[in-house]
Amino acid sequence: AFDTLMIGGGPAGASAAIYAARKGISTGIASERFGGQVVDTLGIENFISVSKTEGPKLVTALEEHVKDYDVDVMNLQRAVKLTPAEAEGGLHEVTFESGATLQSKTLVLATGARWREMNVPGEAEYRNKGVAYCPHCDGPLFKGKHVAVIGGGNSGVEAAIDLAGIVGHVTLFEFMGEMRADAVLQNKLKSLTNVDIVLNAQTTEVTGDGSRVNGLNYKDRTNDENHHVALDGIFVQIGLVPNTEWLKDSPLELSPHGEIITDAKGMTSSPGIFAAGDVTTVPFKQIIIAMGEGANAALGAFDFIIRN
Ligand code: FAD
């Protein structure tokens, strides 16, 4: 059995593994795909102290840093079940799709999240070619251009306000007859001169010229008329889905959105089980934050071990 086992090999899990291994405790990291969302990221310009890098490059650096330590790295392992220790200080067990099981005194759950997709033709084809999901990350790539934001919830309206300060023009598309965002955000959005809002709009297709996005098609749900809008970019803001489906039958406390609830040391509602990064209720989902949270959870796990 491990002293501490990370489930998930994104920035949070990798950071937790390094912090744990540096304490001299036996450490493992099991993940479906080492690197997580960073593998799919093109440019990264907000990883502090590195002016500009690319996702796959950062993942290689992460992997090498982990390899500097005595960490048992297990890739292509999808966790399907969590069985917490029966008594505090006992061993927790994780079952994988392969049928294998691993036991550990402490766990750091760092299975991350994924953007909710529109699932319309063209979206997958033009991902990273004009279709974007993270305004903090990709907004500056559209300086002076015309972009759309899909979704009128808090994240969509915040994204539109944020982007309006960078890009030339923002058109926000909301499926329903009104936006769901907080009134204060809606008022701020409506006060901006380079923003249009289209309500009752069902996006039906992302269009492009074969190499980049050039617009989108939507149906006006009030009269079923189809329209085309020319655009340089589309920010999809219809929610982030935490990868916690595998925890549904566990006693772990989750938020209404399915995120793992943690305390100040990263511990979940089950003693000895910690969580970090995008899979938790941490409000901002970013690489640097996930790494900080991973370090915090690993130190929390070490603290738990020396007290039990
Ligand atoms: P993830 O990166 O999601 O990693 C989760 C890990 O868990 C992966 O290893 C995954 O394979 C594994 N996993 C999931 N389910 C299971 C399971 N059941 N069993 C085993 N393993 C599992 N942030 C920035 O700071 N700057 C940027 O420029 C930036 N650009 C982005 C661009 C894109 C396209 C995307 C999608 C995200 C971007 N982000 C950016 C956000 C950033 O990538 C995330 O905040 C960060 O990766 C979160 O790290 P994490 O370790 O919590 O989760």
Image (cartoon, grey):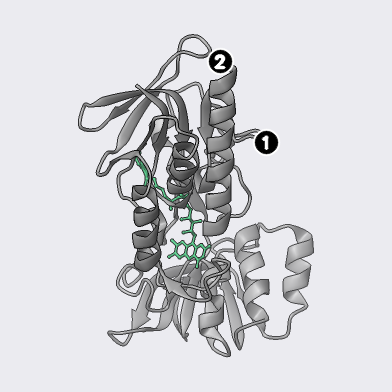
Q: Between 306 and 244, which is closer to the camera in this rendering?
A: 306
Answer above or below: position of 238 versus 282.
below
Estimate the spatial distance between the alpha carbons at disc 2 and disc 1, rounded to whole Å: 19 Å
Please report the residue visible at 53 percent of the width from the left and 12 percent of the height from the top.
88
Residue 232 in picture, x, y percent from top left = 46, 85
Q: Which residue corresponds to mark 1?
A: 264
Viewport quadrant of the C terminus? top right
N-terminal of the pair, mark 2 or mark 1, is: 1
Question: How many C-alpha atoms fall within 10 Å of the one at disc 2: few (<14), some, or many (≥20)?
Answer: few
Viewer-proximal residue among 55 and 134: 55
Indicate left or right for 106 with 268 as reference.
left
Question: Which amino acid, mark 2?
Answer: Asn
Q: Quadrant of residue 192?
A: bottom right
According to the picture, the residue beneath numbered tag 2 turns out to be 308
Q: Is residue 37 visible?
A: yes
Question: How far across and how far down the image is residue 94, in percent?
Answer: 35, 26
Front residue of this view, candidates 233 and 13:
13
**Where is the N terminus found, in terms of image quarters?**
top left
Label 1 CA crowd tier, 10 Å (few <14, some 14–19, many 20+): few
- Picture quadrant of residue 70: top left
Marks 2,1: beta carbons within 8 A: no
Does the rendering let one see residue 260? no
Quadrant holding ligand 1?
Answer: bottom left
Disc 2 versus disc 1: nearer the observer: 2
| Kind of element beneath mark 2 | loop
Badge 1 amino acid = Ala
Q: In this view, does 180 lie to the left or right of 70?
A: right
Residue 28 horizontal/vertical position (percent): 36, 35
